[in-house]
Amino acid sequence: MKLKITNETSKLKSVVLGLPNSMGPAHSLEDSYDAKSYHSLQNGIYPQEKDIVDEMTAFEKVLKKHDVEVYRPHLIENYNQVFARDVAFVIDDKMIISNIIQDRYDEQDAYRKIFARVGWKKIINLPDSAHIEGGDVIVWNDFLFIGTCFSEDYRSFKTARTNEYAIEILKEYFPKKRIIDLELKKNDTNPFEGILHLDCTFNPVGKDKCIIYKDGFVDESDYRLLIDIFGEENCFHVTQQEMFEMNPNIFSISPEIVVSDERFTRLNSHLRNEWGMTVEEIPYHEISKMGGLLRCSTLPLVRE
């Protein structure tokens, strides 16, 4: 398999989609490892497996409708495998295997056949102390945007998934990229105040546009830098409630076609009417209760 991911929106050819089956029992509050899941468990609204299956099936149908080759990981019984993005990610023609949080180590075993198709020469295994997950990595042509946490108490946050050391390693592997680190606000229990991954607060769409939540960044200068790069007129600003509902985490099949949650009425209307995009609306609200949405569920392998 010849990998190619140079940005987030070029026409998608092949992708790994997570699995909704055999998720096992819901975590306890103490064992939850993101704020949205914590909120869902606390309020008794954690999703049922049947609803998750229905939503991912709808997503798969849209991908196949647009002639995307869809791979799936091997099923692990009684294990949540919905969010493929965190297991690995592709930059240019290389696949980086994430050093994900310990709670999810077993998940990578389910991708062995996919890794084998890629071939070991194209796979980068990071040092154990370099922590990074695909949701924090946004590939945008010459730019590599990386969400991180520079806090001195980094290790105390379950929602801090990418550290400074991992960014330094990526700089060595991709010296021609302009790598921009963006510090995200972290909160393990309040999903209105913390950002799990960069793609929960910022996501490019089309050829020169983005969806962004201003208050997801520790420093306003990081937000301003993104506005300068994309241009104010090319940015769709989401509210705190829309961030909570995960509006930024939609998924691009091409510069002209996105997949979005049917509940994102303001965003979907803007994408269609202001930016001229085709919006494939599907139900994905239940999956959002676990801290991820459409981009989180995918691991793109090849784009044109």
Image: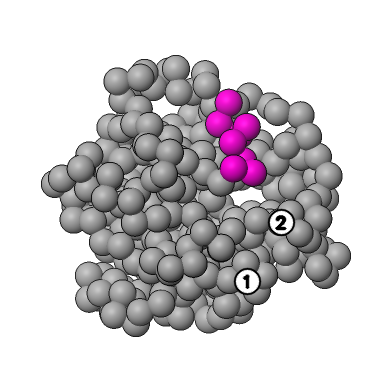
Q: Pointer 1 and pointer 2: residues touching (CB < 8 Å)?
A: no
The disc labelled 1 sits on which kind of residue?
A: Pro
Task: Give the class, few, some or many, for how many residues have Cα within 10 Å of label 1's Cα (few <14, many ≥20).
Answer: many
Task: Give the class, few, some or many, for how many residues have Cα within 10 Å of label 2's Cα (few <14, many ≥20).
Answer: some
Q: Is residue 106 one of those drawn in magenta? A: yes
| Separation of residues labelled 1 and 2 (CA atoms) | 13 Å
Taking the image as shown, residue 225 lies to the left or right of residue 214, namely left
| Label 1: which secondary element | loop
Q: Earlier in the sequence, mark 1 or mark 2?
A: 2
Relative to 40, residue 280 above or below: above
Residue 111: x and y in percent read: 54, 26
Residue 273: x and y in percent read: 44, 72
Q: Which residues are magenta?
A: 102-109
Residue at the spot 30% in from the left edge and 62% down from the top edge: 181
Residue 136: x and y in percent read: 42, 55
Residue 191 — which label? Answer: 1
Magenta stretch prevailing secondary structure:
helix
Image quarter for residue 64? Answer: top right
Residue 129 visible in the shown view:
yes
Taking the image as shown, residue 275 lies to the left or right of residue 100, namely left
Relative to 96, residue 246 above or below: below
Along the line of sight, which residue is nearer the eye, 298 or 39? 39
